[in-house]
Amino acid sequence: MGNRFTELTRAERLELQILGKLTLEKSAGPGESFLCNTLNISTSGALVETGSMIPIGSLLKYSVSFPGFERNFDIMGEVVRGERKGSSVKKDRSQQAAESEPRKLIRYGIMFLDLREEDRKAIEGFFMQARFGSGGPGVTPS
């Protein structure tokens, strides 16, 4: 039996902290929208964080604007993984009873499905700017 898995080359990722928007795609048009924090991005996908529940496999439009660019990028994608991030601070029972549980953020991996060539080149240009220290606030060169 042959190997069913294909090794994927990992696209270069840029760590950053910028606001984005996720809009779920419905068969009858755009669905619900959520704000998200973009944690990293590449030409193949993004890692975002939001307090909203999004089912794995959902199709969505990811909208983001990079520092130094005058336009939004609207990219179709699929949610390929999710990870709940909770508070790791331990409290005693009396503190837990007195306080409500904080809202937990969920990290989602989004795989881009239709990144246009012009958008891919713009993202790569943004990577170059970030590497040479002009990527703007919230961008961490890798």
Image (spheres, helix red, strand yellow):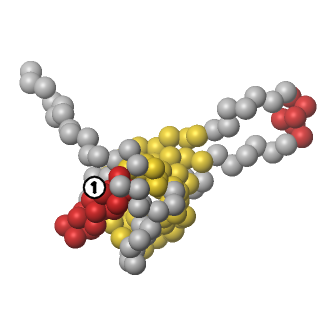
In the picture, the quarter occupied by the C terminus is top left
| Residue depicted at 85% across the width and 27% down the height | 92
**Nearer to the camera, 24 or 105:** 105
**Nearer to the camera, 98 or 72:** 72
Q: Mark 1 points at which residue?
A: 43
| Residue depicted at 76% across the width and 28% down the height | 90
The image position of residue 11, as x and y in percent, is 26, 46
Label count reads: 1
The image position of residue 125, as x and y in percent, is 28, 63
| Residue depicted at 21% across the width and 39% down the height | 9
Asked whether residue 88 is in view, the answer is yes
- Tag 1 secondary structure: loop
Q: Residues within 10 Å of mark 1 (few under 14, many from 20)?
A: some
The image position of residue 122, as x and y in percent, is 28, 66
Q: Is residue 46 left or right of residue 43?
A: right
| Residue found at the far left of this picture | 2
In the picture, the quarter occupied by the N terminus is top left
